[in-house]
Image (cartoon, rainbow, N blue to C red):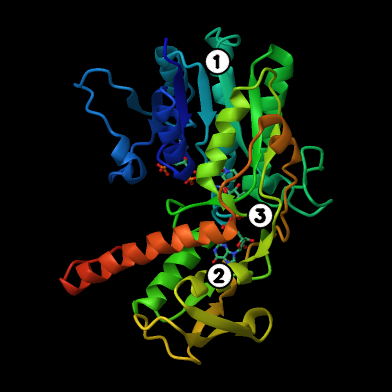
Amino acid sequence: MRKKALVTGITGQDGAYLAELLLSKGYEVHGIKRRSSMFNTDRIDHLYQDPHDEDVRFFLHYGDLSDSTNLIRIIQQVQPDEIYNLGAMSHVKVSFDTPEYTANADGIGTLRLLEAIRILGLTKKTKIYQASTSELYGLVQAVPQSETTPFYPRSPYAVAKMYAYWITVNYREAYGIFACNGILFNHESPLRGETFVTRKITRGVSKIALGMQSSLYLGNLDAKRDWGHAKDYVEAMWLILQQEVPEDFVIATGVTTTVRDFIRMAFSEVGIHIEFKGEGIDEKGFVISCSNPEYQVEAGTQVVAVDPRYFRPTEVELLIGDPTKSNTKLGWIPKYDLPALVKDMMTSDVELFRKERTLKELGYTVKNQYE
Ligand code: NDP
Ligand code: GDR
């Protein structure tokens, strides 16, 4: 019998990579997607299988983490061996604008899935992975952050995820459900949402190099993050559910870098070297040299500026994970380091904007950028 997995958030960055991974392992994969007024399946279109074909292994169901009856019906129908709860309003800054919705989807949404498992009598059959986050650590208590570091959430998103973390632990202890938290540090990829800082940078730098944008406006350049590649991190999710005993794991690289240095690395991928001058909201980035003849960016041009609109009411300044437990118990070792990640994202975005530039020249309207 092939294993069945149900993935919430399948249309997101991690959902797409995880679905690919599970299909490659022979799983039947069911995903929950939200109804949208436009197609929202770009990241998984290559996995689509015509339901009329034989031996279909990829299915999508309409649903939402705010709708219990919908979740119960889907779980009853699918009878999954594994559930990966990746669905969430995942943008920290946006959670300050939509705190109640974030609590409902990210916090209570997790409870709804756990309750569905219990109500349907699947506590011995269905394992569940909860997408927990390094945002739980928030205001620095100790570094590097491990499974035993105390939490201090700093946003409505992180507070909602804190509820989800503990309700997952509680259902494991109270009902014996194989329920685990993966406390994942930031992970990025060419599929990363356009408004997260790494993708905003790789898109902006690509457009500046190609002469399609003059400057990149960002918020806190001092923030430090432990960035890995999403492809590596979905492997860890799967490994967590293959253990003998359900446990929680930190997934991280153990290396931290400032937003400022990420910007420098992205520019140098296209042969542009920059320097920062000034402090705080007056800090700016200028081109020192451009060694790639394809890109006509002159020395002295200002290409980065700070815009306080991207500051958060409360910020998480420093994240650096301790992956010792996942390295040793799961045998999880990431294949990508930060330079390889930046290269992958830059290669993909330069290619994307080359195509977009051609379309623009042919008179097509390209998408607006809301960042
Ligand atoms: P994305 O924002 O790319 O994807 C989020 C997914 O959740 C999308 O498929 C989205 O659907 C779906 N979703 C949003 N709201 C609902 C809802 N109410 N009901 C059902 N589905 C919903 O996030 P990532 O792929 O980057 O992250 C996956 C998970 O991991 C998230 O829970 C995130 O909080 C968590 N996480 C992410 C980390 C990272 O660095 N990427 C680190 C640690 C944790 P739609 O496409 O329709 O918007
Ligand atoms: P984060 O990711 O908040 O860590 O949450 P994000 O990329 O949004 O921010 C990282 C850091 O960069 C700073 N920053 C900016 N951020 C954005 N988005 N836009 C900017 O212009 C900008 N300028 C500076 C931020 O202030 C912050 O310090 C991500 C999400 O994927 C969560 O769902 C996940 O749980 C955590 O990672 C781990």
Residue 158 appears left or right of 46: right
- Name the amino acid, label 1: Thr
Q: For label 2, count other residues whose C-alpha is less than 10 Å away and answer few (under 14), some (14-19) or many (20+).
A: many
- Residue at mark 3: 226
> Element under label 2?
helix
Amino acid at dot 2: Met
Residue at 56% from the left image edge and 51% from the top image edge: 336
Please state the horizontal and vertical placement of residue 261, each as a whole percent of the image: 62, 70
Q: How far apart are marks 3 and 1 (CA)?
A: 32 Å
| Res 350 label | none
- Is the residue marked 3 within 8 Å of ligand 2, measured from its CB? no
Give the answer, above or below, for where 73 lies relative to 213: above
Residue 108, visible in the rendered structure: no
Q: Mark 1 points at which residue?
A: 126
Viewer-closest of 200 and 47: 47
Q: Is residue 316 visible?
A: yes
Q: Locate ligand 2 by image quadrant.
A: bottom right
Sequence-wise, which precedes: disc 3 or disc 1?
1
Quadrant containing the N terminus in the rendered view: top left
Pinpoint residue 161: horizontal percent, then vertical percent: 64, 39
Q: Which of marks 2 and 1 is in front?
A: 2
The residue at 56%/7% (across/down) is 121
